[in-house]
Image (spheres, helix red, strand yellow):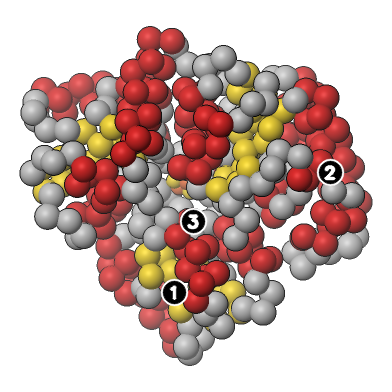
Amino acid sequence: MRQTASPTTATALPLSELYRRVERHIPPFEWPILADDIAAILELKNERNAVILAHNYQTPEIFHTVADIVGDSLALAREAARTDADIIMLAGVHFMAETAKLLNPGKTVLIPDLKAGCSLAASITAADIRLLRERYPSMPIVTYVNTSAAVKAESDICCTSSNAKKIVEALGAPRVIMLPDEYLARNTAAQTKVEIIAWKGHCEVHERFTAGDIRSLRESHPGITVLAHPECPPEVIAECDFSGATAAMADFVDKKRPPRVALLIECAMSDNVALQYPELEFVRPCNLCPHMKRITLPKIRRTLETMTHEVTVDPEIAERARHTVERMMAMG
Ligand code: SF4
């Protein structure tokens, strides 16, 4: 799966070439409507020296046409730290834009819709972390990147779904607090000797998958290979064939080429991977993330035109939050 691209790739391609990337997903009669916004966005990016970072859960018309850098939270954080563009547009949710701002304090970071939140990020506050510190004074706090900058600032280190086990073990402590995703914490605890104390946050997309869904899929689609994201409940992980973060799932499909496959993940991720492997049958029992779906081509265009929805972080909070993200990047 395409994980990163040069900042000029999409801009340098003619629209007809971009359509080829998505023609199996977007019917010809819809393309002219999208193409107008796409052409304007590509031009605006050049004019403003802007780069668009798109999460794997963005729809194919964003992911495969206007995005310069695509990937999961960790890949976007890493690439955000490397870009030399003046403006970073985050086609994703608010905590991702904050993370980009933490790593690029001197750049302008924009988001097309300030209401693009996340149920995990909303499940915990900085005050909650301070209370946990009082209750468990000597225990390290590992915080999933799906949190606000204020929560990161109160934590010891960040993690993503792809490096959670590595980070937890690298701390060398017998017990750690891992938050806010209860299921990621429990799924990580199942792979390590480190004792993990979890919070009760859940991803509203992944918590809806059940072990029964997998059994039904196996009955209705014999021979299917089922991949599940570690934000799914542990009983789902126990019944799937492979569990990993979005990049690991895409890698699994690329290497193993399962002829019939289902990705228990946000719908757009499945669509984006399917476009790259037309020879494979993708069964899509997916769930939509309402926050990711707030980001659309017209909103991206308007944001670049008006330079509105700039994401800022209080400098004192930003300094401490940046430390937790950079500590993770140094370790994992
Ligand atoms: S898919 Fe889940 S974790 Fe990702 S932004 Fe949506 S609610 Fe948050």
Say whether residue 209 is left or right of residue 302.
left
**Residue to which mark 3 is pinned:** 247
Residue at screen point 37% across, 29% down: 326
Tell me which amino acid carries mark 1: Val
Q: Examine the rendered structure and indicate whether residue 100 appears above or below residue 269.
A: above
Q: Residues within 10 Å of mark 2 (few under 14, many from 20)?
A: few
Q: Position of residue 298 (x, y in %)?
A: 78, 37
Q: Earlier in the sequence, mark 3 or mark 2?
A: 2
Circle 1: element type: strand
x, y percent for residue 251: 50, 64
Which residue is label 1 attached to?
Answer: 226
Look at the picture and state if 284 lies above or below 267: below
Q: Secondary structure at mark 3?
A: helix
Direction from residue 194 to residue 211 in the image, left or right: right
Please, what is the three-letter code of the amino acid marked with disc 2? Answer: Ala
Residue 52 coordinates in the image, percent (x, y): 67, 36
**Foreground: 120 or 107?**
107
Q: Which residue is mark 2?
A: 12
- SS for callout 2: helix
Callout 3 amino acid: Ala
**Neighbour tally class for label 3: few under 14, some 14-19, many 20 plus, Cα within 10 Å:** some
The image quadrant of residue 188 is bottom left
Viewer can see residue 235: yes
Quadrant of the image containing the N terminus: bottom right
**Mark-to-mark CA distance, 1 and 2:** 37 Å
In this rendering, the label closer to the viewer, 3 or 1: 3
Residue 272 placement, left or right of 253: right
Residue at 82% across, 37% down: 42
- Of labels 1 and 2, earlier in sequence is 2
Counting every numbered tag in the picture gives 3
Residue 236 percent location from the top left of the image: 33, 67
Q: Earlier in the sequence, mark 3 or mark 1?
A: 1
